């Protein structure tokens, strides 16, 4: 795995047609998962055949090419990234870019089920902050939302992460009638534990078993309700992602909102996503994509790969146009979030 990436100066930086510099890459290392969250997957999912999936060595080479082209922040996601076999091998090899200073941050978004096992290894690989997705503090509700998950195990994972010294941000999808009335409890729990928390609107990605109009809870409404009890002050805090943050005076903690539906955040988009088959999506909310697996596999040198990346960044769209409305029940984008990575 000790493949050297090209020095940054020799590869063109990635600047899209709207002048936005791409410096953040999210990589879905697997489309598989040990949960089946109702807003993310159907219960009966067909996963990609293993032969279509990039090897860990290929993923390393792909990430390294992006780092050479100016990516400063790299997030591994999925599916559930920590269920991919030998995933620590990839973290370990990518950590050389932290050591060299080419990469500012290596991080992960996880459902927390494997954290008890991996937290200290993540720290050894230079990971400092992680996102853990958790939509409720209620054991039965957790089971209902994730279908296969166990909240107790995630809580053990959280404890292990924090004992290992990882800063944890909780991500929760706001779901109408499900965790809608638990939002305050989650906020005070997370802040009481010294963790940031971000709420996310459900996005219309992929066919699921339920009707998304039944799940969608606008965060503008959540914020309005919270403001009846808390003092929320907008703050310029940024983590490189699309969340807008406020400080909660009563708890002293940070609260983020990711609002693709009620507020478009595309103007400042610095991100692209790669799937575990090496497909590059220039926008989470659009179908246009570029195949990077063919150029990656076609040659030992990165020239073809770099050319394909440049060509794709040259058509990064201005933004997404997610809609959730009753007349239009089809998802805006046919692939699931677990394919592109959240
Ligand atoms: N399995 C990991 C996890 O759950 O954190 C990483 C992948 S998951 C696809 C990443 C994030 O996307 C999670 O926070 C999840 O709640 C969120 N997510 C999945 N489907 C979504 C949807 N349709 N709308 C909004 N967020 C979604
Ligand atoms: Fe798995 Fe994450 Fe999707 Fe839940 S949100 S099914 S944990 S990939």
Image (cartoon, rainbow, N blue to C red):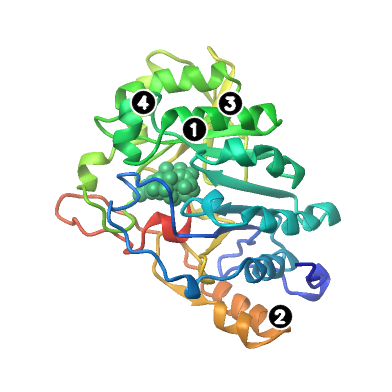
Q: Which residue is mark 4?
A: 139
Q: Which residue is mark 2?
A: 302
Q: Which callout, 2 or 3, points at the residue further toward the start of the chain?
A: 3
Task: Please give the residue where the numbered disc 1 appears in the rendered image.
Answer: 154
Asked if residue 334 lies left or right of residue 267, the reply is left
How many neighbours does mark 3 have within 10 angstroms: few (below 14), some (14-19), or many (20 or more)? some
C-alpha separation, residue under disc 2 versus residue under disc 3: 40 Å
Q: Within 10 Å of the Cα at label 2, are there few (<14), some (14-19), or many (20+) other Cα atoms?
A: some
Q: Identify the residue shown where x is 83% and y is 54%.
A: 101
Report the Cα–Cα distance between label 4 and label 2. Answer: 48 Å
SS under mark 4: helix
In space, the residues marked 3 and 1 are separated at their CA atoms by 15 Å
Q: Is residue 173 above or below residue 10?
A: above
Q: Are marks 3 and 1 in contact (CB under 8 Å)?
A: no
In primary-sequence order, the first of circles 4 and 2 is 4
**Mark 4, other Cα within 10 Å: few <14 / some 14–19 / many ≥20:** few
Between marks 3 and 4 in the image, the one whose residue lies nearer the viewer: 4
Q: Is residue 43 above or below residue 276?
A: above
Q: Is residue 164 above or below residue 311?
A: above
The residue at 58%/26% (across/down) is 195
Please state which of residues 250 and 195 is positioned toward the viewer in this rendering.
Answer: 195
Q: CA distance from mark 1 to mark 2?
A: 40 Å
Q: For mark 3, what is the residue? A: 195
């Amino acid at each position: 795995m000790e493949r050297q990436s090209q020095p940054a100066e020799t590869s063109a930086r990635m600047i899209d047609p709207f002048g936005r510099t791409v410096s953040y890459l999210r990589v879905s290392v697997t489309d598989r998962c040990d949960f089946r969250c109702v807003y993310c997957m159907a219960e009966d999912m067909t996963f990609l055949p293993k032969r279509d999936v990039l090897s860990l060595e290929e993923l390393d080479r792909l990430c390294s090419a992006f780092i050479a082209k100016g990516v400063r922040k790299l997030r591994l996601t999925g599916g559930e990234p920590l269920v991919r076999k030998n995933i620590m091998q990839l973290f370990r090899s990518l950590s050389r870019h932290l050591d060299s200073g080419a990469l500012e941050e290596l991080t992960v978004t996880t459902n927390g089920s494997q954290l008890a096992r991996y937290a200290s290894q993540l720290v050894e690989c230079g990971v400092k902050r992680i996102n853990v997705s958790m939509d409720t503090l209620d054991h039965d509700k957790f089971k209902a939302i994730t279908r296969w998950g166990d909240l107790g195990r995630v809580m053990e994972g959280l404890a292990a992460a924090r004992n290992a010294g990882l800063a944890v941000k909780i991500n929760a999808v706001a779901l109408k009638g499900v965790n809608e009335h638990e939002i305050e409890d989650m906020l005070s729990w997370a802040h009481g534990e010294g963790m940031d928390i971000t709420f996310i609107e459900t996005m219309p990605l992929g066919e699921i078993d339920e009707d998304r109009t039944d799940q969608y809870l606008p965060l503008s409404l959540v914020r309005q309700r919270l403001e009846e009890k808390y003092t929320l002050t907008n703050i310029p805090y940024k983590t490189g992602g699309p969340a807008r943050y406020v400080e909660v005076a009563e708890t002293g903690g940070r609260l983020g909102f990711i609002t693709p539906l009620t507020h478009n955040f595309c103007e400042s988009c610095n991100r692209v996503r790669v799937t575990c088959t090496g497909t590059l999506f220039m926008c989470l909310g659009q179908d246009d994509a570029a195949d990077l697996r063919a150029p990656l596999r076609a040659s030992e040198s990165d020239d073809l790969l770099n050319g394909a990346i440049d060509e794709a960044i040259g058509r990064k769209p201005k933004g997404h146009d997610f809609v959730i409305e009753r007349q239009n029940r089809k998802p805006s984008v046919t692939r699931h979030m677990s394919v592109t990575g959240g």
